[in-house]
Image (spheres, rainbow, N blue to C red):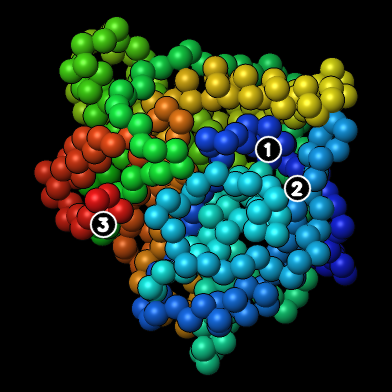
Amino acid sequence: MSDKIIKQSPEWFRLDNAGILFPGQNTRNWSNIFRFSIELKEEIDPEILKQALENIMPRFPAFNVRLRKGLFWYYLEKNPVKAPKVSPDVKNPCYRVKFKESDRFLFRVYYHGTHIAVDLFHAISDGYGNSRFVCTLAAEYLRLKGNDIPCGKFVKDISQPAPKSELVDDFHKYATSKAKASITDKHVYHPQGVKLPKHMVNMTCGIMSFKEVHDIAKAKGVTVTEFFAAIMLDIHCRKQLRENRKQKEVSVQIPINLRNVYPSETMRNFSICLMVKVDPSFGEYSFDELLNQVAFQLRLARDEKKINATISKHVRIEKNPALKFMPLLVKNVCLSVATIFGAEQTTSVYLSNLGEVTLPEEMVPFVEKALFVPGPGMRTAARCGIVSFNDKLVFTIANSFKENDIEREFFTALVKMGIHVKIQSNRE
């Protein structure tokens, strides 16, 4: 079905159902921010990158915004500045966002060597949106370097305005269930460790063949995401046992892209998190038992009716008159308290798989790999981002603790299974 084209970008719009939470959760110590980057095969010219960014910004009205305060809600307003600055990369990626910095844009663009990276505040989009933005930026950069790069796949056509479908809050569009879904969970196990200084993160990347991983996962009857989740559960169950603490549930939080469930093209947030849990008090789990638990729980949770019940619950909460007309100042206090006492309390590990980056055939020879980095957690020692391109899978662990035992055990487990892994890290 063809979609109407927006003749002019909207001057303002509401935050989507997921995005409304993140401004109120923003503190001096933490923001819900994440990174997507593309590594090319040549050094980045910052002046050309700056021009490429200015060229693509009109095509992304959901990114071309600044955050404003209303009486009851935050909202997004069109940013009068042409584009944010392009800066050399930093040692502490995904550090907190300050709404008045960067000309009030809610994302930052960096370059380093052959890398183009965008750190994005989750209030405006998710991994789907950020990956399309960065791939379109890289494509325009290569065009300005004299290469013929068409649009298609992850690369948006910047000669056309954004279709209306890219700016819709699809949570509201598809929330139709009357079922009462539970959205609360028990507090779970968190590894202990020495916290890094504020706004710092240890980032460790394992680069491997997607085919090697996929073949092993397929032989075990699970998906790549389920395979990785089971390894992380195994590591945390054994780590808790070694710490000789009261045994709590161990959980993995896994975001899923709802565009794979509903026919959506939105460039705003449209994903929800599913939880997989095991309780060590039932006894020690073998790795095969963990694989079965992950596959069973995740596939059960991916049922469309259960997903719809969850998003419908979130939309009903947003529309609740008591919350809807609560002053923003009071909302922010409530969200801050909920973040401190809730937030990551129900998550031992965060694991997000963006899947495969697909690019126009003419662009593929210029790209080395893609990288996805979830921002560091407040309590979780393993926030994991997975993305693959051209058989090169990159598994990144963002850790806000000095200890590296989780990373070491995870990549060692892969090597023992016959997977070749190359490690890159910003650790000293």
- Residue 424, label in figure: 3
Is residue 319 placed above or below 182 in the rendered structure?
A: below
What residue is disc 1 on?
23
- Residue 217, label in figure: none
Q: Earlier in the sequence, mark 3 or mark 1?
A: 1
Q: Position of residue 159 (x, y in %)?
A: 72, 79
Q: Residues within 10 Å of mark 2 (few under 14, many from 20)?
A: many
The residues tagged by marks 3 and 1 sit, at their Cα atoms, a distance apart of 32 Å
The image quadrant that residue 228 belongs to is top left
Is residue 14 placed above or below 280 in the rendered structure?
A: below
What residue is disc 2 on?
67
The residues tagged by marks 3 and 2 sit, at their Cα atoms, a distance apart of 35 Å
Q: Is residue 353 visible?
A: no
**Amino acid type shown at disc 1:** Pro
Q: Earlier in the sequence, mark 3 or mark 2?
A: 2
**Amino acid type shown at disc 2:** Leu
Is 51 or 196 nearer to us in this picture? 196
> Left of 330 or right of it: where is 148?
left
The residues tagged by marks 2 and 1 sit, at their Cα atoms, a distance apart of 9 Å
Residue at 75%, 75% (x, y): give it. 160
Q: Check whether the beta carbons of the residues at disc 3 and disc 2 lie within 8 A of each other.
A: no
Is residue 258 placed above or below 302 in the rendered structure?
A: below
Determine whether the residue tagged by mark 1 lies in a helix, strand or loop.
helix
> Left of 237 or right of it: where is 158?
right
